[in-house]
Image (cartoon, grey):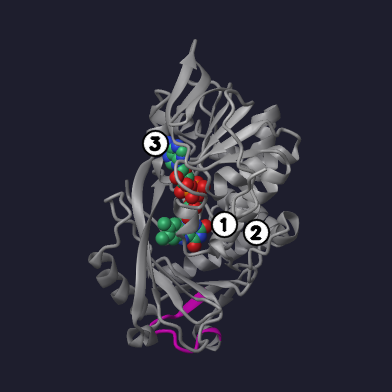
């Protein structure tokens, strides 16, 4: 049997599956792995390009659980716990380095919000610690003079983004799920109001269950089933500098300036503005570079001396409350969503796959992922979060 470089079986596309997952990113593949682990393996993951070609292979790789809203904390705390053993579980080293993630603040009101958040963290079992101006300089010696304090989330960290995707893909494949790259879904067939199949560039497939995990293109995919979602596709960019000696051992997030900074184990800085541009393309822009240079040097002035060697963009889909949209769409039975992850879908992938698999299979809806049901846009129970740098008013 032919196998890809990742060891994944190269199989012919069948004309029917129990479920089809659209999107071979971290979200689609985590779900495929978790479904197959529950014995539901007559499924196919279809990706129009190659695995991790979407935002899952283009992100800043930060993982954390120190948010402010209980629903967000619960979900990402569960995910971080899964991250801790994901390399063993997938038999693939995703290089998860728990070096800590530090949210920094120059304004008193931000520090007050960090104080409130730490109280919630304590109640919910999340490890976080407030740092004053002196302590923050011990952790990040070069931090800007006006930074007054921060909130350290010690179990947070960074991981190798495409390794997570490859690990899920190989593990799902071993359990019998089929993964088909180069397979674009161009239509979703509905019969009597329910999902009946998908049309692809390689032929039609009959299926009663379709999962939309199409990342930045999720709104377009939903429209194929006649469903309009509260999603906007936007571009997020980051840059990487040349390598220098180690000087930053935590990931930094600034919700005030809306940027992130971390130094890789090879010494490069991966950083930039976390404000999405509305252009919804993959082209890197000079505007991003200009704005990012100002923002990141405002937090870590020493970066002004480094050379940017590369920048890139990735497409993400954001909801008005910036929280993901999951679950079955009431007006299109058989259509499940795992979309709208914005700037947090890499860290959230382990939890989402694990919790959505029993929901899709047996209707078991856990209290951790339940609040993110797309139905919240009908009930009005939105879940806005304040401790996020990737934020767009839409
Ligand atoms: C610059 C940047 C920095 C980021 N930083 C972080 C971070 O530090 N931490 C974090 O947690 N998140 C971060 N994110 C967000 C994170 O990368 C995304 O939320 C996450 O990758 C979404 O995963 P996904 O599987 O839903 O989507 P994607 O990885 O985008 O995958 C979707 C896939 O669907 C496929 N597809 C689309 N349409 C079709 C179709 N019609 N037919 C077949 N296939 C289709 C695409 O080819 C793509 O491979 C960042 C994103 C960017 C761009």
Q: Separation of disc 2 and disc 1 at Cα? A: 7 Å
Residue at coordinates 58% horizontally, 21% vertically from top-left? Answer: 208
Which numbered circle lies on residue 80?
Answer: 2
On the image, the x and y values in percent for residue 275 come to 34, 60
User: What's the magenta region?
Assistant: 139-150
In the image, 326: left or right of 280? right
The earlier-in-sequence mark between 2 and 1 is 2
Q: Residue at x 57, y 23 (%)?
A: 15
Residue situated furthest top in the rendering: 192
Asked if the residue under mark 1 is in contact with the one under mark 2, i.e. CB atoms within 8 Å, the reply is yes
Residue receiving disc 3: 219
* Side of 23 relative to 365 (left or right): left
- Residue 283 seen: yes
The reply to whether residue 387 is visible in this rendering is: no
- Mark 1 neighbour density, 10 Å: few (under 14) some (14–19) many (20 or more): many
Q: Is mark 2 on a helix, strand or loop?
A: helix
Q: Which mark is residue 347?
A: 1
Quadrant housing residue 18: top right
Q: Distance between the residues labelled 1 and 3?
A: 22 Å
């Amino acid at each position: 049997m032919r196998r890809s470089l990742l060891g994944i079986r190269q199989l012919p596309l069948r004309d029917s599956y129990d479920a089809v997952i659209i999107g071979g990113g971290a979200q689609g593949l985590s779900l495929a792995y978790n479904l197959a682990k529950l014995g539901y393996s007559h499924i196919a993951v279809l990706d129009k390009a190659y695995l991790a070609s979407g935002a899952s292979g283009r992100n800043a790789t930060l993982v954390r659980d120190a948010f402010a809203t209980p629903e967000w904390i619960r979900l990402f705390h569960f995910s971080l716990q899964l991250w801790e053993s994901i390399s063993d579980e997938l038999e693939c080293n995703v290089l998860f380095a728990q070096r800590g993630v530090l949210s920094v603040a120059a304004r008193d009101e931000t520090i007050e919000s960090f104080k409130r958040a730490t109280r919630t963290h304590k109640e919910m079992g999340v490890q976080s610690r407030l740092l004053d101006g002196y302590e923050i300089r011990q952790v990040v010696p070069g931090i800007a003079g006006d930074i007054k304090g921060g909130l350290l989330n010690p179990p947070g960290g960074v991981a190798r983004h495409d390794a997570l995707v490859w690990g899920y893909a190989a593990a799902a494949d071993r359990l019998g799920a089929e993964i088909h790259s180069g397979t674009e879904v161009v239509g979703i067939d509905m019969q009597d109001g329910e999902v009946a199949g998908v049309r692809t560039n390689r032929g039609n497939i009959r299926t009663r269950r379709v999962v939309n995990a199409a990342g930045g293109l999720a709104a377009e995919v939903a429209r194929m089933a006649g469903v309009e979602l509260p999603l906007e596709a936007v571009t997020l960019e980051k840059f990487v500098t040349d390598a220098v000696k180690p000087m930053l051992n935590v990931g930094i997030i600034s919700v005030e300036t809306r940027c992130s900074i971390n130094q890789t184990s090879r010494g490069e800085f991966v950083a930039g503005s976390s404000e999405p541009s509305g252009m919804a393309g993959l082209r890197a822009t000079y505007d991003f570079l200009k704005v990012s240079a100002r923002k990141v040097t405002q937090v870590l002035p020493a970066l002004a001396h480094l050379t940017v060697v590369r920048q890139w963009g990735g497409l993400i889909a954001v909801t008005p409350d910036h929280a993901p949209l999951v679950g079955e769409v009431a007006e299109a039975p058989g259509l499940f969503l795992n979309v709208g992850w914005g700037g947090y879908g890499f860290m959230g992938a382990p939890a989402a796959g694990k919790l959505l698999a029993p929901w899709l299979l047996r209707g078991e809806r856990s209290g951790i992922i339940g609040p993110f049901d797309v139905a919240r846009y009908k009930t009005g129970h939105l879940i806005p979060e304040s401790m996020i740098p990737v934020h767009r008013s839409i």
